[in-house]
Image (cartoon, grey):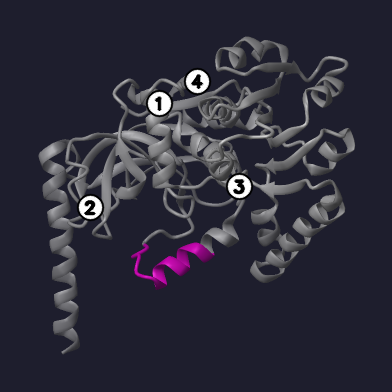
């Protein structure tokens, strides 16, 4: 009986792989050997661990999954942090939780393929992926952080996180937007509550301060805020002033100049301060920037769990939020944490803004696939203007 059961399981797996290979061979016969190239890390030793490996093309595990041949992908600060093990404790917990709730995970912690956003072509899809997306469609999308990423020739992702690529974007441009864009969208629209404030007939305060407006998230945050009819004040260094002005910032302040803090205070008070420059709530408070809500993208949540374990780390996270918020309740201002959110709603919003040209990509440089470690090294240095993209065609 056991032998018969094992035989049936093997036949089912083989059948699934055969269907996968059949679909793949129609579109890309050269990949019938079931292998691809992927940049992976085998331990959390930093950028030196990046290795170009020959691995199996991932197999669709759920009916709603699709397989995408990756044409381009961007490099984000989260990729750099994850080479050092950032978030490993929480992400492993998420993988185990999803395996118990029905997702078939062959996604071991290591070796790990990084990369969160992409453009590409659909080459296979599960029977439950619906008719919205078809084989051969040119798409863009994101990969959740707990899954194997897209710095590889192929990636599997749920169809809800993939959409038809905007026709007014090249495959390079499309790969530069979604991770940073969804981070900005989530921080402002959800965490910052603009989804509620934007529905009001009037806004008493529509001024938003974006600290570090010339980076990947900052450039998209400025454009989203302008699309939402907000008054945007941003900081950057002198070499980026023209860039952020072209993106629509109403007031640009060179943070290196004397009197920059006084200028920032004068331009307030702010409904939201979005900190893309990792200044931190203590520094903002000490400088006296007038505001209602401060949102940092440098949350200690994952770091605390990495250092103290899941339960103790979450307790510490709650303690830190209380510590930052209780002393300033009388001033009616709050400290919040902003995160990347792999959201179908967010992708749809960004798609509409891109197609109406209210949001445009800012690509600083394009690297060849074999030169990916150079792009990682440049992102690790910081102070970028826009995004770095990996061309994988």
Q: Which residue is mark 1?
A: 354
Image quarter where the N terminus lies is bottom left
- 107 in the magenta segment: no
The image quarter containing residue 266 is top right
The secondary element bearing badge 3 is classed as helix
- N-terminal of the two: label 1 or label 4? 1
The secondary element bearing badge 2 is classed as loop
Instruction: Locate residue 138 relative to residue 223 in the image: left or right.
Output: left
Towards the viewer: 12 or 354:
354
Circles 2 and 4 in contact, beta carbons < 8 Å: no
Q: Is residue 237 above or below residue 342?
A: above
Q: CA–CA distance between discs 2 and 3? A: 30 Å
The secondary element bearing badge 1 is classed as helix
Q: Main secondary structure of the magenta part?
A: helix
The residue at 49%/50% (across/down) is 145
Q: CA–CA distance between discs 2 and 4? A: 32 Å
Residue 158 is at least partly visible in this image: no
Q: Which residue is mark 4?
A: 362
- N-terminal of the two: label 3 or label 1? 3
Residue 204 spot, x, y in % from top left: 68, 34
Q: CA–CA distance between discs 1 and 4? A: 12 Å
Task: Give the extent of the magenta segment.
Answer: 93-105
- N-terminal of the two: label 4 or label 3? 3
For residue 129, the mark is 2
């Amino acid at each position: 009986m056991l032998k018969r059961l094992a035989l049936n399981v093997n036949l089912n797996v083989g059948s699934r792989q055969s269907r996968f290979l059949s679909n793949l061979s129609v579109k890309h016969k050269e990949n019938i050997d079931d292998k691809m190239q992927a940049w992976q890390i085998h331990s959390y030793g930093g950028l030196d661990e990046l290795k170009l490996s020959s691995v199996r093309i991932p197999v669709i595990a759920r009916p709603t999954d699709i397989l995408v041949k990756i044409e381009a992908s961007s490099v984000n600060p989260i990729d750099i942090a994850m080479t050092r093990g950032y978030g490993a404790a929480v992400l492993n917990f998420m993988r185990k939780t999803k395996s118990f709730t029905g997702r078939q995970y062959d996604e071991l912690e290591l070796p790990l393929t990084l990369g969160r956003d992409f453009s590409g072509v659909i080459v296979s899809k599960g029977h439950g992926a619906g008719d919205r997306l078809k084989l051969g469609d040119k798409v863009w999308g994101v990969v959740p952080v707990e899954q194997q990423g897209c710095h590889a020739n192929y990636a599997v992702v749920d169809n809800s996180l993939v959409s038809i690529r905007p026709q007014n974007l090249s495959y390079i441009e499309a790969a530069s937007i979604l991770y940073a864009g969804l981070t900005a969208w989530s921080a402002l629209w959800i965490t910052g509550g603009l989804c509620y404030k934007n529905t009001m007939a009037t806004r008493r305060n529509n001024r938003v301060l974006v600290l570090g407006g010339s980076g990947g998230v900052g450039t998209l945050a400025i454009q989203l805020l302008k699309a939402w009819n907000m008054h945007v004040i941003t900081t950057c260094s002198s070499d980026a002033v023209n860039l952020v002005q072209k993106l629509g910032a109403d007031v640009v302040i060179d943070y290196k100049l004397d009197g920059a803090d006084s200028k920032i205070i004068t331009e307030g008070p702010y409904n939201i301060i979005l900190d893309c420059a990792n200044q931190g709530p203590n520094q903002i408070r000490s400088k006296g920037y007038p505001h209602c809500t401060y949102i940092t993208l440098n949350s200690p949540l994952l770091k605390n769990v990495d250092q103290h374990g899941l339960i103790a780390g979450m307790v510490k996270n709650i303690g830190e939020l209380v510590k930052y918020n209780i002393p300033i309740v009388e001033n009616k201002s709050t400290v919040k944490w902003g995160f990347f959110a792999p959201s179908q709603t967010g992708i749809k919003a960004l798609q509409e803004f891109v197609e109406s040209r209210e949001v445009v990509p800012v690509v600083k440089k394009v690297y060849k696939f074999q030169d990916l470690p150079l792009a990682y090294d440049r992102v690790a240095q910081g102070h970028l203007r826009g995004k770095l993209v990996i061309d994988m065609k």
